[in-house]
Amino acid sequence: MGLFTVQFSQGGLKQLVQEIRQKRFDSWEWFLLALHGDELHVAQRTPSGLLALGHLAERWKKAGVIPYPHQIKAAERVINEMRGQAILADEVGLGKTIEAGLILKEYMLRGLVRKALILTPANLAWQWYSELYEKFNIVPGIQRTKWDWEYSDILIASIDTAKREEHARIIHGIQYDMLIVDEAHKLKNSSTAAFRLVDGIQKKFCLMLTATPVQNDLKELYNLITLLKPGQLGSYRSFRAKFMKDKRTPKNPGELRSLLSQVLIRHKRGAGTVQFTKRIVHPIVVRLSPIEQELYDQVTRFIKDAGRKAGLSGPLILPLITLQREVCSSFFAAGLTLQKMLDKGQPHPNPVLGEILVRAAQIRQNSKCDILEQLMSTLEDKVIIFTEYRATQDYIRYRLERAGYSTVGFDGRLSRGKKEWIKQQFYRNAQVMVSTESGGEGLNLQFCNTIINFDLPWNPMRLEQRIGRVHRLGQMRDVHIYNLVTENTIEEHIMYLLHKKINLFEEIIGELDAILLHLNLAKSFESELMRIFLEHDEKEAIRRELDEFGDRILQGKHAVKSAVIDLL
């Protein structure tokens, strides 16, 4: 046992005795505060514990947030082992955003991050805002003007906006503490403006989020890793010689995995991560009354005649697609579009439009709402009803409140504060929320597990976004999806394609996006459906075309899965 010499400071001891005699010491409360400060200081320097877990415990309890063990471990690894430089590559649906938010919050609490930039696809900006605010008490800005880059400490921005020359020049002049890039696989090509933007950003810490860091070519993986941590994989020439048999086949996979594990974290579904609850689909067939069916057929004949004359590329095709979708939702929604089309035709309005509008105004029955009321009488829990149209939303609320149900409306017109208030009203008081498509962005409602699709969007990504409001991380119950489908209408064909043919409702969240991008259908899905409906009148012919279209989607699904190189 070693011996140590203990030395005392005589002057220090004398000063201590003097302070005690003169009672020049602070109260017990001040002592406890100083002790707590020292503990925090020590904790900040201790790599094993996350300050954010204790700091956010009360907020998470109120919001019903339960972080998964794999998310906490990912945050600890990034901070303790990877020094804040990491690719978060969990499979779709395992909560990469939560991991990134937890890491950002931890660094902010430690005083290491003050200025951060989050680059994301434009359609995910509000979702990021909601996640950071609700779960981490971080209030970011969303970039709108060129002045936001310098004056917002935590800023969310569209990567497509940021890569423009006038914005990129400003961004490259700013020193960021942290950069977060969502959908980072879009940076795989080193010759793109987005790659050059991220490569030129000055940052202390960097997180890249992607479920598919390597797909068709190992060079994509090399570019992504080099963008994050230059030199990690050496030069491209040495990487190709050492690790590539060809562009899709890795060489020395064990050594390559070891290098990747230093900068990349990937969790897969299964034991130790997340088991999603089931989606249970209930198609409910709605039979129109004779007068409703007659009006539907008249509108459809008008659309087919006008569409065939205008052609799919003509300027009239978009309002015709809208009208065809609206007439399956409600005649109230369709009536507004008919009136606009009639007004645009002045001073020579189309007499057919005028006749249809008069007949629509005379209809007092709505068979879909009749079925909806019957369905609601069998449901006891909270329900969210989705429609694409505000006119339909207003009518649904009128019918349900007349039947004795408490409802709230949620749509894109509401301010951020009003949206949060409506959400709390639904959570605490109302049984039913009726939401439009635009209102659903960034809306997380895991406390509800019943969805009614009053009408079906033609774009399957929109349908997936609806379901994703409740079937997401944190949902503890099976989700019931009721689809109201009008018989002998286009809706019947849409339901066949999405449910029977491509089994959309049971797809893994997010896979569909990759499939549609692979087939170049992300923006033209609705136009492809409209082409089929315009070209064919017979039910059998439409079904045959939809079968072929569905086969293309299924082949695309297979191609996307086979393109992923199993290296992670």
Image (cartoon, grey):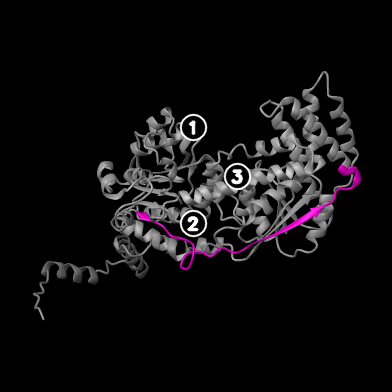
Residue 492 position, x and y percent, is 76, 48
Direction from residue 508 to residue 368 in the image, left or right: right
Which residue is at the front of the view, 37 or 77?
A: 77
Residue 282 position, x and y percent, is 72, 59
Residue 30 position, x and y percent, is 35, 65
Lower position in the chain sequence, tag 3 or tag 1: 1
Measured in 3D between alpha carbons, the distance from the residue under mark 1 to the one under mark 2, in whole angstroms, is 30 Å
Disc on res. 552: 3
Q: Which residues are magenta?
A: 264-293
Secondary structure, mark 1, is: loop
Measured in 3D between alpha carbons, the distance from the residue under mark 3 to the one under mark 1, in whole angstroms, is 41 Å
Tell whether label 1 touches label 3 (CB within 8 Å): no
What's the amino acid at mark 2?
A: Gly
Q: What is the crowding at mark 1: few (fewer than 14 residues within 10 Å), some, or many (at least 20)?
A: few
- Label 2: which residue? 95
What's the amino acid at mark 3?
A: Arg
- Label 1: which residue? 145
Disc 2 versus disc 3: nearer the observer: 3
Q: Residue sitting at 78 percent across and 59 percent down?
A: 376
Question: For residue 359, what is the image quadrant?
Answer: top right
Which residue is at the front of the view, 262 or 382?
A: 262
Q: Residue sitting at 77 percent across and 28 percent down?
A: 306
Secondary structure, mark 2, is: loop
Disc 1 versus disc 2: nearer the observer: 2
Q: Is residue 88 visible?
A: yes
Residue 470 position, x and y percent, is 62, 57
